Image (cartoon, rainbow, N blue to C red):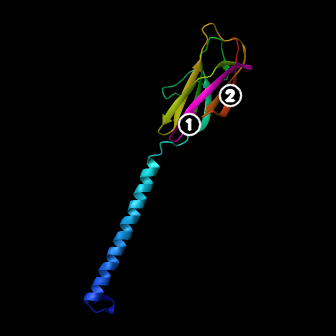
């Protein structure tokens, strides 16, 4: 016999118990690992994080700003895109200001699986007055950044 042990019913029984104990421990560990993985994959209330705020005069198919600028013409449509990282849900909003005057304050409930972009825009059929403007972005009511831009005649 290996290790110089003699075979006996008692030694076989203790070896089988030791083996069964290790198998049970392995199964318990495997079950705990699977539960942790499943809980991590089902994070439905994960918090979004804003990575950047883009401003420009065109938007691409993935809702990111395609033509970045901070100087607009009175007849331009002005876009802002709030980029978020990772999976999560929340309320993304923006506050458009002309000087200190509120122009618009839209918001959207969003839920994303992975990085995403949320687009907002303003336009004025009569043309925007020349001057200094700003747009402030919010995530769940908390400010996450502000961009300034101007409208000038060509």
| Crowd tier of the residue under label 1, counting other residues whose Cα lies within 10 Å: few below 14, some 14–19, many 20 or above | many
- The residue range painted magenta reads 83-101
Q: Is residue 101 left or right of residue 113?
A: right
| Crowd tier of the residue under label 2, counting other residues whose Cα lies within 10 Å: few below 14, some 14–19, many 20 or above | some
Q: Residue at x 65, y 24 (%)?
A: 95
Majority secondary structure in the magenta region: strand
Q: Would you name the residue on which mark 1 appears? A: 84
Identify the secondary structure beneath mark 1: strand
Q: Residue at x 60, y 34 (%)?
A: 140
Write down the quadrant of residue 52 in the picture.
top right
Residue furthest to the top: 126
Tell me the quadrant of the picture where the N terminus can be found: bottom left
Identify the secondary structure beneath mark 2: strand
Residue 63 image point, x, y percent = 52, 27
Residue 64 image point, x, y percent = 54, 29
User: Given contact means CB atoms under 8 Å apart, are the residues at marks 2 and 1 in contact?
Assistant: no
Residue 14 image point, x, y percent = 32, 83
Q: Would you name the residue on which mark 2 appears? A: 147
Q: CA distance from mark 2 to mark 1?
A: 16 Å
Tell me the quadrant of the picture where the C terminus can be found: top right
Mark earlier in primary sequence (2, 1):
1
Determine if the magenta segment contains residue 42: no
122 and 72: which one is in front? Answer: 122
Residue 95 appears in the rendering:
yes
107 and 137: which one is in front? Answer: 107
Determine if the magenta segment contains residue 95: yes
Residue 104 image point, x, y percent = 63, 19
Q: Residue at x 42, y 59 (%)?
A: 33
């Amino acid at each position: 016999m290996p290790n110089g042990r003699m075979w006996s019913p008692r030694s076989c029984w203790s070896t089988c118990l030791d083996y069964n104990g290790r198998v049970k421990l392995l199964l318990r560990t495997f079950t705990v690992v699977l539960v942790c993985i499943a809980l991590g994959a089902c994070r439905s209330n994960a918090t979004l994080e804003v990575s950047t705020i883009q401003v420009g005069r065109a938007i691409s198919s993935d809702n990111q700003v395609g033509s970045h600028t901070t100087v607009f013409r009175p007849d331009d449509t002005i876009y802002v895109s709030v980029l978020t990282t990772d999976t999560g849900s929340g309320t993304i909003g923006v506050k458009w200001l002309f000087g200190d005057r509120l122009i618009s304050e839209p918001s959207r409930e969003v839920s994303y699986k992975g990085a995403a972009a949320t687009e907002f825009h303003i336009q004025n059929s009569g043309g925007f007055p020349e001057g200094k403007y700003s747009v402030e972005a919010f995530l769940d009511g908390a400010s996450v950044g502000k961009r300034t831009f101007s409208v000038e005649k060509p």
